[in-house]
Image (cartoon, rainbow, N blue to C red):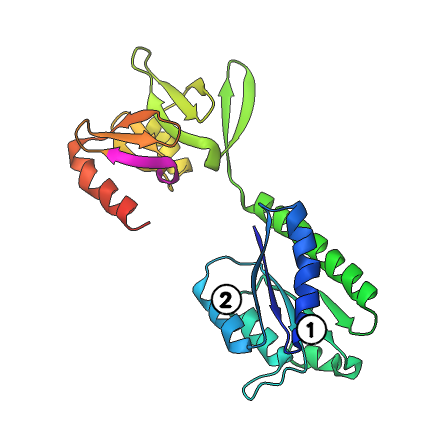
Amino acid sequence: MLHILICEDDAIQRAYMESVVKEHTAIKDNEIKLAMSSSDPIQILAYTNTHPEKGGLYFLDIDLQHNEMNGIELGAKIKEVDPLAKIVFVTTHSELAHLTFKHKINALDYIVKDKPEEIKTRIHECIKESHDLCLKEKQEQMKYFKVDANGEVWSIPYNEILFFETHANVRHRVILHTENGKIDFRGFLSEIEKLIPEFYRAHKSYYLNIDKINYIDKLTKEAVMQNGKRALIAQKKMAGLVGIIGER
């Protein structure tokens, strides 16, 4: 999700920018969010420091009437915390644009407050560009498990895999379980462990995607996945798995 933050000390201008952003979020409600709008750069920076999401979009007024920092200084501090942040400066002072280079801020855009309709258009363009960049970054970060099954090669995103299970009746066969089905292929869990170290070997026959565990049934010694499927947990692996789940 793309998180948008606004720092503008003019209340009327800030309210207008909020309304423009909300027009866009209404269309892509599950993908874009107005996370914060404030006149205080300290609040904006505090949000950035306390939220793990990276690659946010920031609309910053350069000439903030604040005794600790202006918009350019705020942008520089945001970049220290979130190197992937998209910074857009909005100001009446076009002559201050050169200061963004001095502070080594690679701004996405620089909007001069002159005509409201032009500001609206530019804000929408910045949101669309930032959202497209987020989708591209997410796609690049996504990892896939390639599996050859019955002559067909499948590329399964890690975040769609529930767990791997050794075949109960056929040697050297593994079953890959997803939320919507399963794939039977030739393989070994030991080999898969090396390829996907992020998962957890909960049992000699099960290798789990921890992010897909809904809860642990200690009575039956099973991990219940998000779609209701169950995977066995060895007694000696129970405490370790419970500890990992508890930290998340």
Residue 23 in sight here: yes
Task: Kindly identify the amino acid type of the residue bearing the numbered disc 1.
Answer: Ile
Which disc, if any, is residue 12?
A: 1
Instruction: Give residue 121's position: percent from left, percent from top.
Output: 79, 59
- Seen in the picture, residue 119 relative to 214 is either above or below; the reply is below
Residue 195: image quadrant is top left
Determine the secondary structure under disc 2. Answer: helix
> Mark 1 to mark 2: distance in Å?
24 Å
Q: Indicate whether residue 214 is drawn in magenta.
A: yes
Q: Residue furthest bottom?
A: 67
Residue 105 in sight here: no
Answer left or right for 234 relative to 14: left
Answer left or right for 11 relative to 172: right
The part of the chain drawn in magenta is 210-216
Instruction: Give residue 4's position: percent from left, percent from top.
Output: 60, 60
- Seen in the picture, residue 171 relative to 142 is either above or below; the reply is above
Mark 2 lies on residue: 48
Instruction: Choose mark 1 or mark 2, whichever is in front.
Output: 1
Task: Kindly identify the amino acid type of the residue bearing the numbered disc 2.
Answer: Thr
Instruction: Give residue 186's position: percent from left, percent from top.
Output: 42, 18
Determine the secondary structure under disc 1. Answer: helix
